[in-house]
Image (tube, helix red, strand yellow):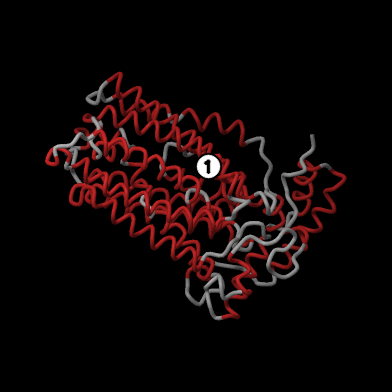
Amino acid sequence: MSLINTNYDYLRTMGIAEDDPLVGVIVSVYYLGCAVGAVIASWFANLRGRKPGIMLCLATAADNQTLGGIDAVVPVYTSELSDDDARGEALAKEFQANIFGLNMAFIVNVLLTNSLGKNSPWAWRLPIIVMQIYPLLLFAVVSRLPETPRWFILHERQDDAKQSLADVFGADTADEKLSTLVDAHEEEQKSGIITYSDLLLPSGNQSHPTTVTIMGQVNQALTGYGAVSVYGPQIFELLGFSVMDAEYITLGNYISYFLLMTLAWLLIDRKGRRWLLVNGAWGLLVSFLLLTLLGGLGYNATNLHISYLGPGISGAVVLYFATAVFGIGWLVPPWLIPTEIYPSTARAQGSAISVIIWGLANFTVTLLTPIGFNKLHYWLFLVFAATNAFAGWWTWLYVPESGGRSFEENQEFFKKATEAKSWSVFEVGGGAWSKLPEKGKGGGEEVAEGERQPLLSEQRS
C-alpha cells in the first residue's frame, strides 16, 4: 500500500487529498478486515482442521480478511508440527518467506510506478491483479501438506491421526507416537472445555496467557515499525530525499530486511524469545532517538544552511538498522508465543485473539501515523522511542521464555504464577522462565513424551 497511497490517480479515485487523514483510515481499515478473518479462520480450523483452514484463506485471497486468517492458522499449524527446540526457527523461516513476498510486491509497485507514472490508474490496479496469481500456486503446495495429528486426536479421530503419523514417519512408528500424543491429550482434557470467556474474562483460567498474548501484539505495534512499513517512502521524503529516490531507498530497505531475517531463525531458538524482544526494543529505542535528531536536521536543512544529504543518508542507515532490529527481534515472537502457551483446545482461539489485537493495534497506529507526521513531523520518532521503552520494560518483566519447552511446561508457568500470586517472571518458579531451560530441563514438571516429540523432524526419505 505504500506506493498505492502516493499514486495520484488512486487518490483522485478515492476523492481524497495527498495529506488527507482519510489516507490513514483507508490503510487502517485493512487491519480491521484482518481481525474479522482471524475469527472466522480460527473457528473453521478448529472445526474442520488446520489444513482446510489454510485452504479457506487461499480461496478468499482477494479479501483482506485472508491475511488475518493465515496469520491465525499458520502459526498454530507450524507449532503443532515442530519440535520444542525448533518451533521458533520454523515460524521465522515462514516469516522470511513472507518478507520475500513483500519484496516482490514492492518491486512490482516500483517498476509500474516509474514506468507508467503516478498519474496512471494501472500503476496501482495491476499490482492488485498480479496478487491473485500467488494463491493459485500455493494451492498446489498446501494440498500436499499433512493435517496435524494433534488436531485429529483433539477430535477423537485416532485412526486418522495414526494414518497421518504413518504418512509422515512410516507405519512402524505410528502406534508408539499415537499413544504418546493421546496420553498428552487426555492430560489436557482434565481441565475441561475452554471457551473464549475463559480466555478473555479476568476470572477465566486462561486470562493470564491471554494478557501475554494481547500485550505482545500491542507492544509490537508500539515499536512503530508498522508505520515504517506502510509509510516508508514518506519517511525517507521527510529525511530530505526526492520522491523517486525515497521509493528506491525503501526497496533497498525491504531487501535488507529479507536478508537479515536469516538472523531471526538462527537466534530465536538459541537465544530465546525474551532475549530477542527485550534487546530488540532497546535497539529500536536508540534508533528512533537518532531518527528524531537526524529527521530534525533534514527537515530544517534549509534554515540551518546545511545539505540534506548528511542527515538524510545517516537517517537512511539508521532506518535500515531499525528495520533489521525489528525483523530479528519483534516480527516473529509475538506470533509464536501464543501458539506455545495454550492447551490444544484453546490454541487456535489464542492465536485468533493475537491476530485480532494485531489488527486493532495496527489500525490505531496506521490511522494516527499520517496525522502524527503532519502535526509532529520528525518529533513522532521521539514518541516511538518512548513506546519502545515501555515495550522493552513490560516484556522483560512479564513475558515468560517459552522456547525449548513443551506446551505443557509453558502452561505450568501460569499455574505457578497463580500459586505465587505474581505475574513477574522473576518471582515464578525461581525465575526459571526468565531464560531458556538447560538442555534436557524444561523448567516445569515432568510431561508426557508426546508433548516433546517432534512431528516433522524424522520424516521418511
Q: Hey, which residue is sitting farthest top in the picture? A: 115
Query: What is the x, y in percent for residue 393?
Result: 44, 65
103 is higher (above) or lower (below) than 344: above
Quadrant, the N terminus: top left
Q: Is residue 278 visible?
A: yes
Q: Nearer the viewer, residue 267 or 225?
A: 267
Q: Nearer the viewer, residue 14 or 436?
A: 436
Mark 1, secondary structure of its residue = helix
Query: What is the x, y in percent for residue 305?
Result: 14, 37
Q: Quadrant of residue 230?
A: top left
Q: For the residue marked with disc 1, what is the amino acid?
A: Phe
Q: Nearer the viewer, residue 59 or 431?
A: 431
Q: Is residue 360 visible?
A: no
125 is higher (above) or lower (below) than 213: above
Query: What is the x, y in percent for residue 181?
Result: 76, 58
Q: Residues within 10 Å of mark 1 (few under 14, many from 20)?
A: some
Query: What is the x, y in percent for residue 116?
Result: 28, 19
Left or right: 304 as drawn, with respect to 194: left
Q: Hey, which residue is sitting farthest right in the picture? A: 172
Please name the residue that numbered disc 1 is placed on: 95
Q: Nearer the viewer, residue 137 or 256?
A: 256
292 is higher (above) or lower (below) than 304: below
